[in-house]
Amino acid sequence: MSKQPFFSEKSKLYEMIAVNPKLLPLLPRFGIQLGFGDHSIGEVCRANGVDTRLFLLICNIYTDDEALVHPKDIEAIDMDGLLPYLLASHRYYLDERFPHIEEHLQHIINAAGPKYGNMLNHFYNEYQQEVKKHFKYEEEEVFPYIESLRKGQSTNNFSISQFRVNHSNIEDTLEDMMNILVKYLPGDILPKERIEISTDIIELSADLISHSLIEDQILIPYVETLENAKQ
């Protein structure tokens, strides 16, 4: 990476979480459960069958969104865990984060009346469908293509350059919901719950930005090396 990594395999895992609590939701995506005591990052990763260098690379990108990954970092890391991590991230967003937001947002929609409630419902449904479409494309087109490359099998005319061109920041649509919740909805409509849901949306947006960076900085360069090796 272009900067000195924030953490190393000898760092205590709890100390890393204490420095950046936003890394806590990443642990289950790697299959790492809580209760790891004072063990180091390397010890916890090895105990859970996780490549320490991949784990650190992803955590450091989540900590510094301006970090740049050097091609040598990609070549030196065992990438077997990358696709399972990305798939686990998809499940986290779709099965946990969105239902949580939807449950609380529905209370606000019901209290807001037709004028604002219908707009909130429209923007949320539009955003949710956009996210599902994005993930479906990755899971049905991109990831199987990568698996075929990894196995040395013949592939179709797809290439990762197509994914790069079509890779959009799906979190941008959240801005419309935030504008209504924070700027336009009358102040006496569930103010406490609006602050809580706005905080959840901000956290989700930041997580999705980091998720996109993982794909831009790690996934795409990795697949390019597979494609080049096949030529």
Image (cartoon, rainbow, N blue to C red):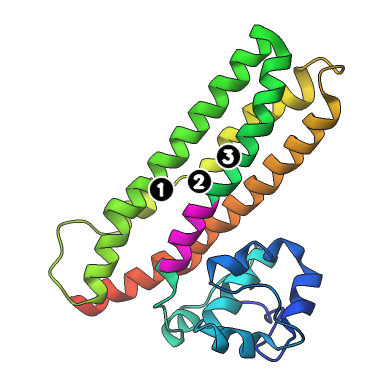
Q: Are marks 3 and 2 in contact (CB under 8 Å)?
A: no
Q: Which mark is residue 9?
A: none
Residue 121 left/right relative to 154? right
Q: Residue under label 1, please give it.
A: 135
How many numbered discs? 3
Q: Residue at x 52, y 47 (%)?
A: 95
**Magenta part of the protein: which range?**
84-92
What secondary structure is found at the residue carrying circle 3?
A: helix
Q: Residue at x 54, y 72 (%)?
A: 31
* Residue type of the residue flagged with mark 1: Phe
Q: Residue under label 2, please give it.
A: 94
Q: Mark 2 or mark 1, which is nearer to you?
A: 2
The residues tagged by marks 3 and 2 sit, at their Cα atoms, a distance apart of 7 Å
Q: Residue under label 3, please give it.
A: 99
Quadrant of the image for the C terminus? bottom left
Q: Position of residue 210 (x, y in %)?
A: 59, 57
- Up-down relation of residue 155 to residue 181 (above or below): below
Point out the tag, 2 or 1, that comes first from the N-terminus.
Answer: 2
* Residue type of the residue flagged with mark 2: Leu
The residues tagged by marks 1 and 3 sit, at their Cα atoms, a distance apart of 16 Å
Point out the tag, 3 or 2, that comes first from the N-terminus.
Answer: 2
